[in-house]
Image (cartoon, grey):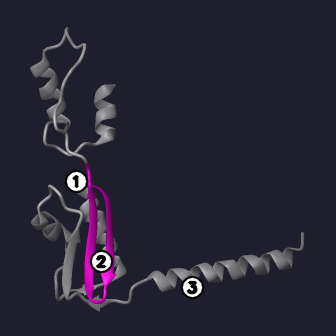
Amino acid sequence: MNLPKSLATFATALLASLATLAAWAADPFTVSDIRLEGLQRVEAGTVFATLGIKAGDTYSDERGSAAIRALFELGLFKDVRIDTDGHAIVVIVQERPTIADVDFTGAKEFDKAALQKALREVGLAEGRPYDKALADRAEQ
């Protein structure tokens, strides 16, 4: 193996990757509009209040990343993206499924109301967003 040639190839690939990342980075701009896509049950006001960005603010990649983290922390979404369209930002979300009903099969030795109360206390109840990790923990 020719070490200098391999090093040169690696350096070229690294520079190309960095150039690609720089092309993806958005230059800061003043937000003229905010659009929401993908909302089904979550209120738009919840997203706007959590976003931390409003029309007239300066948008940067750092603020966008912070907004995405804040929206994920709500626990209501399984995917969140922010795209830019000129001087507008487009918040694209995919909501977590909502628990429609909690039913028990084969739990004759336990009181159904007590089981439902225990699940409610850990966040698994009708109308709440489904969280697989919570369901797995409750099952054990």
The amino acid pointed to by label 1 is Leu
Q: Which residue is mark 2?
A: 63
Counting residues from the start of the chain, the first of labels 1 and 2 encountered is 2
Q: Which residues are magenta?
A: 75-96
Secondary element at tag 3 = helix
On the image, numbered disc 3 is attached to which residue?
Answer: 19
In reply to whether residue 86 is colored magenta, the answer given is: yes
SS at mark 1? loop
Side of 43 where 58 appears, left or right: right
Residue marked by disc 1: 76
Instruction: Look at 14% across and 55% down and name the residue there.
Output: 41
Tell which of 94 and 76 is nearer to you.
94
Q: Residue 28's x, y, as percent?
A: 33, 89
- The image quadrant of residue 102 is top left
Q: Quadrant of the C terminus?
A: top left
Residue at 13 percent across and 42 percent down: it is: 127
Q: Are there few (<14), some (14-19), or many (20+) residues within 10 Å of tag 1?
A: many
Residue at the farthest right position: 1
